[in-house]
Each structure stands twice: as C-alpha cells, then as structure tokens.
Amino acid sequence: MEVSSSEVEKMRHSLSHVLAAAVRELYPTTTFGVGPAIENGFYYDIDFGGEKVSDADLEKIEKKMRGLVKRGLQMVRREVSREEALEWAKENNQKYKVELIEELPADEPITFYDLKDEQSGEVLFSDLCKGPHVEDLGKIGTFRLDRIAGAYWRGDEKREMLTRIYGLAFETEDELKAYLERQEEAKKRDHRKLGKELDLFCFSELVGSGLPLFTPRGTVLREELSEFSLGLRGKAGFRKVWTPHITKVDLYKASGHYAKFGDELFMVHSQVNGEEFAMKPMNCPHHAQIFASQPRTYREMPVRYMEATTDYRDEKTGELGGLSRVRALTQDDSHVFCRREQIKDEIQQLVKIVRKLYTTVGMDKLRARLSYRDESDKYLGDPELWKMAQGQIKEAAVDNGLEYFEQEGEAAFYGPKIDFMAEDALGREHQVATIQLDFVQPERFGLEFVNEEGKKERPVMIHHATLGSIERFMSVFIEHTGGWFPLWCAPEQVRVLTVNDKVEDYVKEVEKVLSDVVLDEPVKGNELRFEVDRSDDSLGKKIKRATEMKIPVVLIVGEKDASERVVSVRTREGEEKVELDELRGWLEQRSMK
C-alpha cells in the first residue's frame, strides 16, 4: 500500500525529534534550534556548545536513534500555556526555543510533542512543535544519517553558527537504496568535478569567489548554447542590442530595483567627479532606455530586444557554488515592449522558443510554475493590473497545453511570471526559462507610444530568458549529460586517432573532409571542431584519453582503413565503418545527437 506524501512527511518530521532525543542523550548540554522534514529526509540545527561534532560521529548518533525506535515509543501531543512553554525552555537552557516561543502570536496555541514510553510512562524527550507526527515510532519507515553542515541560526550570518545534521528517510529500504544510487550517480556528474576533468572552467583566488573563468573548451560550449538561444529569438523578430556594464545608480532607483535589491549591488565610484555607479545586476532598465530613446508608434509594436550580457550581483560567499550560483552571471536576456492585446501572442511565441530549446538539449519534460503575488507589500503596481496579468499568463498556459501549477508569493516585484521547471537525467527538477509581465517599469520610466487615434499609450514590458543565467544552465546541462554533450555543442566534436605514421597521407584526406563539414543544426554555419592525435602512444591509450574527455565521435585510421578508404567510427552507441566519401553526410545527419 502506497503511503501518502503527508504520511511520509510525518515520518520525516518525527525522525527529526528522534535525532534530537539521541543527541541529547549523547551530548546532554546541547541546545536545539529547529528540525523540520525536508525533501528526502529531515534535519536538526543544534548548538553543541563548542564541542566538535563531525561526520565521524554520525554512526554513534544513528545507533542511538535506532535504539530509541526499537523501544516502540509514542509521539504524544500536548498543549501548554505560553508561561509553561517559556518556563520549560528556560529551565532546560533552550535559548533558541525561548526566542521562538516569544515570537508566537498571542492567540496561537502552543504545543509540545513528547517521546513517551507507554509501558513505563517515562518521557524521554520533549520538544516545542506544531506537528503533525506519527503516533508511534513503529511507523517511522527506514532512515540513515547523511551528513553534517553549518547553518546560521534563522539564516542570519550575524547570528550563531549551528551544526546541522541531515538525515534521509523513506517508506521502504528499496526507496532509500534507489535514492543513494542516484546520489552516487550525481557525484559522478557533479559539474564542478566534470568542469575540471573536461577542462571547461576554473576559479582563481586572485580573481575572486563566484567569478568563473572559462577555458577555450568551456567557452565553445557556452557560446554554442548562447548562439542557439539567440538564434531562436532572432527568427522570432528579436534584435540584438548592447548595454554597458556600469550604470549610474539613479537608473535602479528610478526602476525600483535599488529599493528592493540595493544590498546586492557592486558599487563603483568615479575618481574624477565622485559620481556613484553600479555594476549592472540586470538589463531591463537599460533596454527600457533604448525603447525610450526615440518616439514610437503603434505600427512598430511589438518592439523586441535581446542581449547576452554579464550581470553582477554581490552574493554572499557562503551561498556561492561552482557555476550554480555566481557573482558574474551571463543572461540570455530579452524584452518585448507591446500592447496589452499583443501579450497573449507574444507569450505563446516565447513558450514555443522555450519548448524548442529544451527539446533540443534533451530536457523536454517541462512544467510551468505560474508565479503570482501574495498579500504582502513587496510588490509594486496597480493590483487590478496584476489581476489582469495573472489571468493572461494562466490563459496562455492553458492555451499552450502546458503542465502547470500556481504559486502565490513567487512573482517578481513588478509582475507575475511563468517559470519553467525542467527535469534532468536523474529526475531532479530545475528552474530554467522564465517569462515575466511588467506593468511597473513602463510606468516608472514613462514609456509610451502613439496609438491609432494619435493618443499616447503605455506599453507592457515582457521579460524573457530562455537559458536564464548561462552559467547556472551550464551547471545543470553538464550534470544532465554527464559531460557527454550532443555533437552540435561539444567543445571537441571529433578526434582522429592514427594507428601509425604509415597512414599519414590518408589522415590528411580525412582532415580535408572534416574541414569541409558545416553543421547547420541547430546553430547555423558552424565548422566542425576536430583534432588529430598523432602521438606515439598506443591506440589503447589514445582511445582512453578520448573517452575520458568524452569526445562524441572518435575516428580511428589504420592501414586497413586507408586501403579500404573508410574510417572506423567509435561513439557511445558502438562502432561502425563509414566510407570516406560518406563521412561528411554521416556527421551532418548526426549533429543533433
């Protein structure tokens, strides 16, 4: 019988309490933060009072947890007064719980859960918690402790650093085993590991954290992806623009970004006149200025701009990770300025572009998150416009047959959006492309065009990124492919391996054929990228090197191949012989694989 997701969450939440109880028995002076259920398991943030705890200690903590589970303890809920709760927290030196209790609304009931031995009546552990939990630990499923990490209390880097112990929990042992196997595969595919092994990118302490440097091979990959994205939009009427990398702060104050994201700006001060500039964190205000640079009429609408450009954000050092989160991020950005009645058609066109790109890169399992505003005051603009815009994006999702879900509180501050979620080869979901409506910036910048009646009308702005941050997309794409990139975007598409010097004349003929190959799909007019390994190493070593670098197509040229005027082709699918006269066509047909 399949257990519901709510029941699994109860199991995981209950295990966080068992973890805390086990830690308390082993380390009696510990104080506890929070311990929620999370995807695939649970964690608890714990203050060990200066005592060093590492992954090496997980085995004894887990053993203690299993001992508690075997006792068949009950999870008993009880409601207490605020005074009782505070008295408990203070008596037990639980300062973090004191803070949580004091912040609870006055009219909210305060509940505890006790780990209780029903036979003896002994309460082994009590914890402040809303629940829910399993009734007894016999329904706890299967689990194991995973790892230890650091975590600031309440996520505030100015507060105490706690020790976070992560655990995994599933209904069955088979589910846990399958998850661990996926995790092992994920380690092999880690983009930071593959980035180094395949010579794609690097970091330098002298350059700075979160500022990746791309090698020649990595630059080929990012430019192929970028050109594909730009090419799709170019066919849809988008035109390239260019904007500078520093901008007066006044631009972001006018757009509204400074008030929302001012602490993420890298500031630049002029030594000449003291003017204050910022490294640009986004491109939309700049594109708005290009639109505003000359009078516009309804006959021009919609106006579409695109730009692949690097933006800069002062991310916290602890949140940086490989290419997933960086301080210099290159966006394949685009903006549409259109009339309200053109919104639907523009969104439909952008949805087609998204589908085409992600189908091509092998991530065609997409679903859309329709991100709406909530009731907080973090959003700008007329609520009625928001209501209309949210209706527009939902209608577009339905009309385009998108699998979608709606989520309040995830909108941009200037408008609702469609965020596309793509599934990778390991079944993990990543946010990728986005389409965002914006009624705020056209108003703030006074953007306008003249309509058919000769009256001034305010355009709507649509933000769109197909890849999003190219760096972040590369981290996803590297792990999705495991470094085995499709032929069209592989940094090195073909490697020729010579058996000996006797085939040199024939190898030159092979090189001539390869030099004439032009791959037009999906990026038009790309000459083939190939190398010839003429080293004195054995053929086995040459094959091993090519395999380690994950070259999509390896051509082996021996004396028999030369005499028969063929090449021996090795791919991940197997081996075959291809006649030299047919090699060009064979490669062109294979370009999308």
Image (cartoon, rainbow, N blue to C red):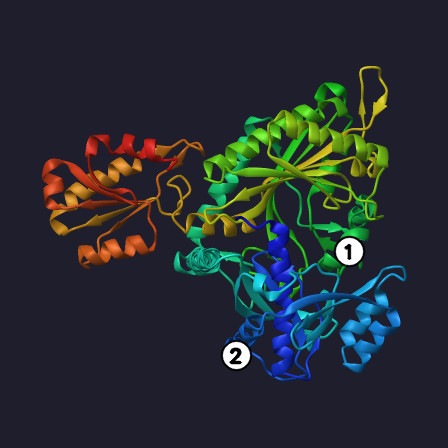
Return the residue found at the far right: 106
Q: Residues within 10 Å of mark 2 (few under 14, many from 20)?
A: few
Name which of mark 1 and mark 2 comes first in the sequence: 2
Q: Residues within 10 Å of mark 1 (few under 14, many from 20)?
A: some
* Residue placed most toward the observer, 403 or 517: 403
Where does residue 563 sit, x and y in percent of width and height?
A: 9, 39
The numbered mark at residue 60 is 2
Q: In this picture, is 260 found above or below 163?
A: above
Where does residue 539 sit, x and y in percent of width and height?
A: 18, 55
Q: Amino acid at mark 2?
A: Lys
* Residue placed most toward the observer, 511 or 392: 392
* The C terminus sits in image quarter: top left
Where does residue 542 sit, x and y in percent of width and height?
A: 23, 55
Instruction: Judge depth for marks 1 and 2 and give the one in front.
Output: 2
* Residue placed most toward the observer, 141 or 350: 141
Regarding residue 150, the answer to whether it shows in the image is: no
Residue behind mark 1: 262
Residue 233, picture quadrant: top right
Q: Residue at x 76, y 25 (%)?
A: 340
Q: Residue at x 14, y 52 (%)?
A: 500
The numbered mark at residue 159 is none
Q: Amino acid at mark 1?
A: Gly
Regarding residue 101, the answer to whether it shows in the image is: yes
Secondary structure under badge 2?
A: helix
Q: Residues under labels 1 and 2: Cα distance?
A: 46 Å
Q: In this picture, is 18 found above or below 468?
A: below
Return the residue found at the far front: 119
